[in-house]
Amino acid sequence: MRAMQRGRVSSDDADRVAYARDLWPRQQIRTRAGEAAIAPPAVVVWPERTEEVASVVRFAYERGLPIVPFGAGSGVCGGILPTPDAIVLDLKRLRRLRYVDEAMLRARVEAGILGQHLEDELDARGYTLGHFPSSIYCSTLGGWIAGRSAGQCSGRYGKIEDMVLGLDFVDGTGRIHRIHRDGEDAALLPLVIGSEGILGVVTEAELRIAPAARERIFAGFVFPDVSSGLDAIRRIYQSGLRPAVARLYDPFDSFMKRRGSVKSKVRPDRPKPTSPAKALGMKALVAALEHAQALNRLVDLAPDRVLGGATLVLVWECDRELGEVEREEAKRIALDLAAKDLGEEPARHWLAHRHSVSYRQSPIFRAGAFSDTMEVSARWSRLEALYDAVRKALGKHVFVMAHFSHAYPDGGSIYFTFAGAAKDDAEAMEIYDRAWADALAAAVDAGGSLSHHHGVGRSKAPFMRAEQGEAVGWVADLKRTLDPKSLFNRGTLIPEEVLRG
Ligand SMILES: Cc1cc2nc3c(=O)[nH]c(=O)nc-3n(C[C@H](O)[C@H](O)[C@H](O)COP(=O)(O)OP(=O)(O)OC[C@H]3O[C@@H](n4cnc5c(N)ncnc54)[C@H](O)[C@@H]3O)c2cc1C
């Protein structure tokens, strides 16, 4: 094994602990409780090419050793949780952009490349993949493909599965498959995309690209309530308009966004709170979170007009003339539904802060509370009922806000952000688990999906049978075929008992 011969392998404690988990908030609670790694893997290996990945897998296959593919570890569902005998395959050295085919608008890229590096390389040539997850600085192409990721501009460019034309993939025996939409193995492509590393490792992909957007058109509206805002988004996409971004914030989330945008403006007359003041604020927040149910009731009782209604931001990435025509039509639809035109500012503000919100978790955990996000999707006819059901289920345990993003002609997704607190970490874990279990059950009951883009990992695997029925067994059959010794990511995506048969 060349990777190992060349020293690209480590069994140092620091590396083993660093690679023992992803960013699943449940593990963050355990880390805070003093258990940084439940079971650090045996070794971490950094292969540099597909053939090296294949030889590591063959080594593991001969010895029956578990393997965990590792992109950047930004997954939030417990996809990465190795056992002590496992080999973690960090793919970040497979990071080359092999070519850009300008005539065909395609690029071939290795799977370990970090998202922002890929965008920078394409942008330098005048192109974009159009995939901008909030985690773009800390996630890889392979991780996106494994989890069916969605970027912020999915309204124009689609999700990652819409962009992948072909894959190089190493299965659980070490065999390399070169799969392409135009090739013999085409049927395997949609099965590997979204397989969360349980069938093998994606090492390279051919991707559809687009000319980089040089113009952006912005619009913002406030609706009397969530219902009319959702109606507007549905009509916008069903009438053929294609904003790259459409985000509708529920009244409380809208209220918080407005506070955020006021705070983020420079106010020399009002100095920023000092650290003790901040600490005090956080303490008060944590104390309030221990009464999450009452807090949710308070928000529910506040009339929408006090919170200010539901805010929609729209961003187009296309040439100016087309964007302006689309904006006018979107405005007509919005005003027809009693919206007020807010002009460009809210959408411009969103763009300027598009990655900042996601990195605010640490202070919450440090203060003894926890937070997490849950993203579900459904067809339009079920979306509002899904919103009500999941919000109610989560709201029994944790404080909840929500926005709607990723809209399509046939449906859309809801992104819940929630936070809770308890007397100690053991109780926090109980609340966390109950909140998730109730919310996932509510999502399935309301006809929604368990996940729109974060994937399933270990956090949602126990509910896969409820959502997918016997199809979960077919996935297990496929795993038995491609990974006969079940080396890859056991426990992720499909429940262990389904795999045992
Ligand atoms: C702050 C923040 C914001 C986020 N925002 C978004 C967002 O906007 N949209 C979104 O979709 N997600 C988002 N996520 C979730 C996360 O970034 C995605 O799930 C991402 O796709 C994970 O990529 P990764 O490279 O970090 O994968 P990892 O976390 O390393 O791995 C995820 C899973 O994929 C498997 N895997 C990784 N690479 C490969 C490979 N090459 N072959 C086979 N299996 C592989 C792993 O074994 C694991 O099961 C966010 C996460 C954070 C922390």
Image (cartoon, helix red, strand yellow):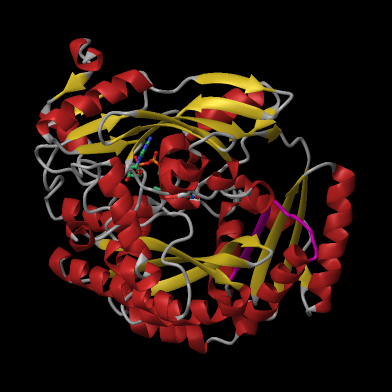
Q: Is residue 81 left or right of residue 184?
A: left
Q: Is residue 283 left or right of residue 31?
A: right
Residue positioned 36% across, 54% down in the render: 361
Rendering coords of residue 197 (x, y %): 33, 43
Rendering coords of residue 368 (x, y %): 24, 61
Q: Foreground residue, 482 or 27? A: 482
Labels in figure, total: 0
Residue positioned 36% across, 47% down in the render: 196
Q: Foreground residue, 113 or 62? A: 62
- Quadrant in the picture for residue 206: top right
417 over 318 or under it: above or below? below
Range covered by the magenta-colored residues: 239-249
Q: Foreground residue, 30 or 463? A: 463
Tell me if residue 279 can be seen.
Answer: no
Rendering coords of residue 354 (x, y %): 57, 48
For the C terminus, the image quarter is bottom left
Say whether residue 174 is magenta.
no
114 over 500 or under it: above or below? above
139 over 324 or under it: above or below? above
Quadrant of picture, ligand 1: top left
Say whether residue 241 is magenta.
yes
For the N terminus, the image quarter is top left
Residue positioned 69% across, 49% down in the render: 156
Rendering coords of residue 35 (x, y %): 12, 50
Q: Is residue 58 left or right of residue 35?
A: right
